[in-house]
Image (spheres, rainbow, N blue to C red):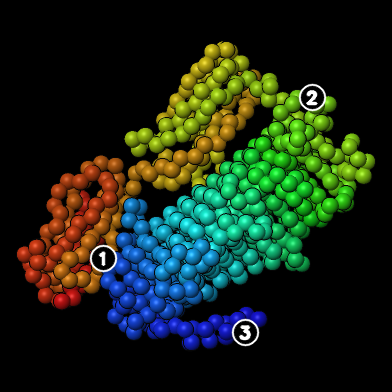
Amino acid sequence: MKKLFLFVFLGFISINAQFITPGTGVQWTLDSLVANSAGAVTGTFPNYTVSAVCSVSVNDRLIIPQGSTVTFSATGIGFVILGAVEVNGVQGDSVYFKGATENPQGAYEGFYFRDTGTDTTSVIKYAVFVHGYYPVRCLNSSPRIYNSRFYKCRRPIYMSSSSNPVIKYNYISEAYEYGIYGTTGSSPIIEYNELYNNNSQNTSPKNQITFGTQNNNSPRIRFNKIHGGSYNRTGGVSISALLGGSASASEIAFNEIYNNSYGIALAGAEITSYVHNNLIYNNNINSDPQTTGSGISVSGNGTNRPIISRNTIYGNLWGITVYNGSTIAAGPTPSLGNLTNADTSDDGYNKIYGNFQTGVPFDLFNNCTNDIYAQNNDWGVYDSASIETHITHKVDDPARGWVYFTPFIDSSIVPVELESFAAQLIDGNVLLNWTTASELNNAGFVIERKSELDQVWSRAGYVTGKGTTTSKNEYSFTDKPGSEGTYAYRLRQIDFDGTSNLSMTVFVEFTGVVLSHQLNQNYPNPFNPETVINYTVGGNETQRVALRIYDALGAEVATLVEDFQAPGNYSVKFNTKSAGSNLSSGVYLYELTINSTTITKKLIVNK
């Protein structure tokens, strides 16, 4: 099947592509495509038009610089990437991709990554895609997609056949169908994105993030904001393993999921997903509880056995539903909290409350004949008789299995009532502020920190508590992580007897010290008469900086910078005429010296 598909694809290229790069290791730009593609790409910087499929062959690389605007002239037009591509937008100066018409069902194809050995070196950053059919499509390919916006595209990010891209810090909204879709063995990293109001088609259930149903699809979906409101058939996150041989060991964690038709759905067999530390609320925009409305739904057979822990679930039509079809039958075996085994990852700590239909609570609904462990959770009520009214199981119908919910957490006796907790970046430091409404035997707070790369929490500091008080108290703590990135913070409140309770988790993006100096490739290159050179001064103190131009024999022809500069990013224009050098065509060197560090690159003057 794969060979047949490849044959069909090659036939498509031979008929429709007006340009295929030769695969000789050349670094292509839009300008060089204009010069060599026989009209497939036209224009000058910053505005270009692509009028036919352009294929970047194996060994070749396409580079699209910041500030470029690319218009695809018709549906079916785009770039096929067999080699590599760099879309190098920057914050405040993106690369813009659009169609000749404003068609939310897809005005162009965008980037199609196919079986490329260098795909992990491909990157799309700070790009804007509007009205694309498949703005980013991956077939057995794993590019990186960062800090980009997808608006009114049909299927913004689509992956299949063992594609594992890294998708971070993007904003995806008003997609005609799915926001992010993966199948046939795709396990990407999806972190720190915001997905809003996708599935504008709204004629069938399509979700903000969907994976399944063939092979093992095990994405890592963490730290995202996933919300809707306008389209009542849009779900939050769906993982399905419905066909034979399919499975998922996905991680769904630290997400905020709200105002969808449901929060998270795990459907099928051989699912061992780890669902933890999510905030899932008000997923009730579809008023039909027979088809939707769960904070988390788990359906299928007994091999669907996810771990569900440390989530907060409220305001949905159902809290958690467990079922196998519409009748009571043997079904999934999720662990919502099991204190009888040695595994501590499934020790509960969920907070499940306030999930109602017409005034009746449905915090956990077991429609299966098998028993479910749901120990060590907070149900918002604090005696067994009251909790029974929030759970549907054997007590309500003898055909159903039991829900083992004792022991449970009684948050009414938690010694500290935390009123607020927030993190923000101030003057290069992370500032944490929190307020307590009251305290009982409070020894203090351990501040715990974890970066996006860390597997475990580390101690960042400690703040002494107020003991016992009914007064409001405000606390703060300043932290400075060692490197840039997104950090999670939480408070571990310690009693005088040593017991502890964890707070909610807050996040902050730390743009702190850049430790290394950097010199970027000039753009454009080749050039005449002007080019731009960007560089970074690293460290945490002012340093002596020099930027000079030399000819091929080593003679200095221009000094662009000679000064003391603070750490940060800098941009310098070099004009061969204004510099008074009136350089002839040829290869030159530009050299950045910062204290004892020297970095040298080549530039080309082409007159």
Q: Is residue 198 left or right of residue 522?
A: right
Left or right of residue 356, residue 211 in this image: left
Image: 329 above or below 555: above
Q: Percent x, y for residue 18?
A: 41, 84
Residue at x 33% of width, y 71% of height: 48
> Is 56 rendered above or below residue 311?
below
Q: Which quarter shows the N terminus?
A: bottom right
Which residue bears the numbered disc 2? Answer: 383
Q: Which residue is mark 1?
A: 523
State the residue at coordinates (82%, 54%): 325
Q: Amino acid at mark 3?
A: Leu
Q: Amino acid at mark 2?
A: Asp
- Measured in 3D between alpha carbons, the distance from the residue under mark 2 to the one under mark 1, in whole angstroms, is 68 Å
Q: Which residue is mark 3?
A: 4
Q: Residue 118: x, y in percent?
A: 46, 71
C-alpha gap between disc 3 and disc 1 = 42 Å
